[in-house]
Image (cartoon, helix red, strand yellow):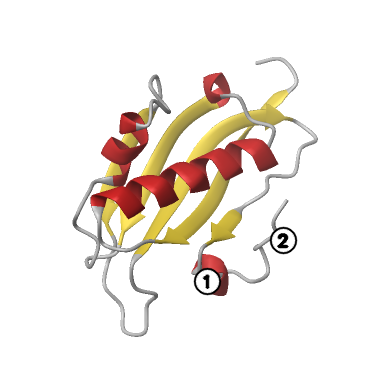
Amino acid sequence: MNGKKLFAVRGATQCLNTAEDITRQVAALYREVLARNKLDEENIVSLVFSVTEDLDAKNPAAALRGCGLAADTALFAVQEARFGGGLERTVRLLLHCYLDEDSRPFHVYRNGAEILRPDRAAPSP
């Protein structure tokens, strides 16, 4: 990829443990990551989700696919390791993508997950 560099973009959102809310929040997180990074899906290499153990109503990868998003992207979801004091009801993402070499990736923390990385949580667009 000419003039492109591989980046990793992070993000997280909190969800209610319903299939509908997981779908809504994961799709919103994904769309915001794309928008803030001016990223086309064709430049995404892979996307890994981690989910806290209290979210079991829907797999976030299946939720994203069900919205018609990331159709040609390698998706994977894992249960997050449990640690005392961790933020509950949270889906995190790690997206690998190609951006222009001089880009600075924007990480997206929303819907209560801003507490995880206040240094990276950007104000709403």
Amino acid type indicated by mark 1: Leu
Judging by the rendered image, the residue that carries numbered circle 1 is: 116
Q: Residue at x 57, y 46 (%)?
A: 9
Is residue 122 found left or right of 77 in the rendered image?
right
CA–CA distance in space, label 1 to label 2? 15 Å
The extreme bottom residue here reads 85
Judging by the rendered image, the residue that carries numbered circle 2 is: 123
Graded by Cα atoms within 10 Å as few (under 14), some (14 to 19) or many (20 or more), the crowding at tag 1 reads: some
Q: Are marks 1 and 2 in contact (CB under 8 Å)?
A: no
- State which tag comes first along the sequence, 1 or 2: 1
Is residue 27 found left or right of 63 in the rendered image?
right
Badge nearest the viewer, 1 or 2: 2
Query: In terms of image quadrants, where is residue 14?
Result: bottom left
The extreme front residue here reads 20
Of the pair 99 and 37, the residue shown nearer to us:
37
Where is residue 19 shown, x and y percent of the image?
25, 50
